[in-house]
Image (tube, grey):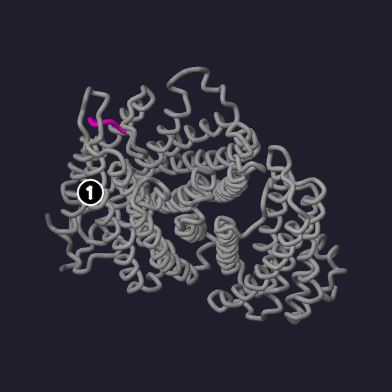
Amino acid sequence: MKSATMNYEDRVVTAFTFASVAWALLGMTAGVYVAAELVWPTIDFGAAGLSFGRLRTLHTTLVLFGFGVSALMGTAFYTVQRTSHVRLFAPKLAWAIFWAWQVAILLGGISILAGWNAGKEYAELEWPFDIAIALAWVAFAVVFFGTIAIRRVDAIYISNWFYGALIIVVAMLHIVNSLELPATLGKSYSLFSGAQDAVVQWWYGHNAVGFLLTGGFLGMLYYFLPKQAEQPIWSYRLSIVAFWAFVYTYIWAGPHHLHYHAIPAWVQSLGMVMSLILLAPSWATMVNGIMTVSGAAQKLRTDPALKFIVLALAFYGLATFEGPMLAIRSVNVFSHFTEWTIGHVHSGALGWNALITFGTFYYLVPRLAGAPLYSVQLANRHFWLALAGVMLYVLSMWGAGISQGVLWLSLDSLGEVRFSFNDVMAAMHPYYMLRLVAGLLFLWGAVLMFWNLTQTFAKRSTVTVTVPAGATA
Amino acid sequence: MPARFSILDLGKILFSPTAVFQAVARESPPATRVFFRFALWLGLLPPLFAYVGTLKFGWRLGVEPVFLPPRSVLTICVLYYAILLFGFVSGGVVARWMASTYDASQSLGRCFALLAIVGAPLAVGSIVHLYPNAFINVLVLVPALIWSMFLLYRGLPVVLETGPNRGMLMASALIAYLLVALVSLFGITVALWGSGLGPRIGA
C-alpha cells in the first residue's frame, strides 16, 4: 500500500474504548453492590450468585480485565500506529483479539457467578479461560510488535516501551501462574503447592499491579499527556531511565504481600527492599508528568480531560508512596488484612487508573468520532464527582483500617486479644456506609461519562486519519 | 481589612476568607508574624480538644471505649501539636519551593498565610475531638476538609498571585504533598507502635 493512501485503523480502537466503558459500569456496579453487602449482609438473599465471594471476584475481574485491559489494548493500538507512522499490523487479527477478549470476559464473568474459581486472587478464571486469555494475549503481542517491526520512525517512543513491557511481562506472569492440572471442565489444581504456590501467586499478583496497572497506564500517560498538553515530555531522558529502573525493580517486589508468612525471611526482606527502591522510578515519572503539565496551564480552561490527568498524577504520587511504605514489615504488621490495604488499592485503581483512563477517553472519543465532546459541563461535573468519590473512599478506608489495626492489636490484662472479630466488624459499619457513598459518587460520574461519550459518538462523522507521508526510517 | 494575622482575627478568616485573601496579597505579612501570632495558636486547638475528649470519654472506635493513662494522652497530644506545626511549616516551605514552577509569589509569609487560612476550618472543626468517636469525627471533619480544599483552590491564585489555571495545578500538587505527608505520618506512627514505642492500650 502506498503511504499516501494509508489510513490508521481506528475502528478497533473505538470498539475497545466503548467496551472498556461498558465493563467499567458493570464492574463498578458489582463493586458498589459488594460494598452494600458489607453494610447490609442480607442483601445476597441467600443466592450463591449474589454472595460476596462471587460478586467481589466478578468486580475485580471486570474492572481489571474488562475495563482496564480493554482500555490498554485500545490505546496501545492507537498509540503504536501514530508513533510508528504506519497502519496497524494485521488489523483483522486486532479485531479477532477484540472479540476474543470481550467474549472471554463475558463468559468468564458468568463462570465466576456460577462458582467456577481457580482459587488464585486476580487470576480466578478457570483453565479454559486461562488458555483463551493466553492465546488472545499472544495475538496482542503479534499485532503490537508487528506494528513496531514495520515502523517508519527510527526511535521507539517511550509509550511503546511501556506497552511492550506490559505485553511481555503479563504473558510471562499469566502463563506461569496459570500452570495447572485440569480435573474437570470447571476445576483445576495449581502445579505449585504450599509456600511455592504463595510466592508464585504474589509474583503474579503484584506484577499485575506493576506491569498492567502501573506500566501499561504509564504507556497511556506518556502518549496522551503530551498530546493534550501540547507540550513535549519535560525530560525524555528521565522517562527512559525511570522505565528501566521500574522494570528491573518491580519484578522483585511481590513477596511484600507475604510478610510474616511461611516463606523465607530473606525473600520477605528482598521484597521489602525492592518495594522501597521502587519509589524512585515511580516518583521520577510523577515529576516528569507534573512538570509536563505545568507548562500547559492555559489549556485547563478549555479542556476537561486535562484535569483528570492532573488529578490522576496526584493520586499516582500518593499510591506509589503509600505502597512502598505499606511494604515495610513493621508497618505491614499493623496494616495487613485491614481496610487500609483496600483504601490503598483504590487510591491507585480509582485515583490513578480510572482517572487517567477517563481523561484519555474524553480526549480520544471526540477525535475518533470527528465531533466535539457532547457536553463539557457534564465532563466537569464528572471530574468533581470522581474527586469526591475517591477522596471519600480513601479517607473512609484509612479510618476503618487504622481502627481495625488498633482494635486487633489491643490486648487485655491477661495478654489476650481484647476484641472479637465480630466486635471489630460491627465497628466497621459506619465506615462501610461512607465507602458505599463514595462508590456511588464515583459510579455516578462514570454513568455521566458513558452518556457524554455515547452522545458524542452519536454525532460522529467519517474520520480517517492518514499516515504522514514524509516519514521514513 | 488589614491582615494583622493575630489569632483574634480567626472569625474574619473563617467568615470572610475572600477579603482576607486579598488583604494578604496586598500586604504580604511576614512569615514570623503569621507563625507566632496565628499558626502557633490555631494549631493548639486540635490537641487541646483531643486531650480533654480522650481523658473524659476515651477513644470510641465503634466498640467499648478505649481509655489511656493520662500521661500517655498528654504525650500523644504534645506529639500531635508538634506534628501539626511540622505539617504547617513543611507545607509552607514546599509551597514556596513549588511556586517558581507555577510563576507564583515566593514569599514564605504568603505561603504560611495561605496554609493558615486553609487550615482554619479543620482546626475549628476539630472541636469534635471533644467527643473522640471516630465516626462522628469523620462526619464533621470531612465537610471541613472539603471546605478547606475549596479555600485552597480558590485562595491560592489570589494569595500567591498566579493565574487561575496555574493555581489549580499548584493547588493539586500541594494536595498531593499533604496527602503524602499524612500517609507518612500514619506509617511512622504504626512502625513506632510496632516496635514497642507507643501507648499501652487496655493494660
In front of the other: A62 or A363: A62
Q: Eyeballing the image, is A57 above or below B29?
A: above
Give the total number of marks visible in the rendering. 1
Please tell me how crowded label 1 is: few (under 14), some (14-19), or many (20+) other residues with Cα within 10 Å.
some
The residue drawn where x is 20% and y is 64% is A469
Q: Eyeballing the image, is B165 above or below A434?
A: below
Per the image, the residue denoted by label 1 is A172
Q: Position of residue A241 (x, y in %)?
A: 32, 71
Specify the quadrant that holds the N terminus of chain B: bottom right
Drawn side of residue B87 relative to residue A337, left or right: right
Magenta region includes residue A104: no
Q: Which residues are magenta?
A: A125-129
From this viewpoint, which residue is outermost toward the top?
A: A46
From this viewpoint, which residue is outermost toward the front?
A: A414
In front of the other: A179 or B122: A179
Residue A372 visible to the viewer: no
> Of the residues shown, which amino acid type is indicated by label 1?
Met
Q: Eyeballing the image, is A31 above or below A360?
A: above
The residue drawn where x is 50% and y is 44% is A342
Q: Position of residue A204 (x, y in %)?
A: 31, 47
In front of the other: A242 or B188: B188
The residue drawn where x is 54% and y is 34% is A35
Residue A44 visible to the viewer: yes
User: In the figure, residue A435 lies in which quadrant?
Assistant: top right
Q: Position of residue A33 (x, y in %)?
A: 52, 30
Main secondary structure along the magenta-highlighted residues: helix
In front of the other: B98 or B103: B98
Q: Position of residue A282 (x, y in %)?
A: 41, 63
The residue drawn where x is 41% and y is 40% is A63
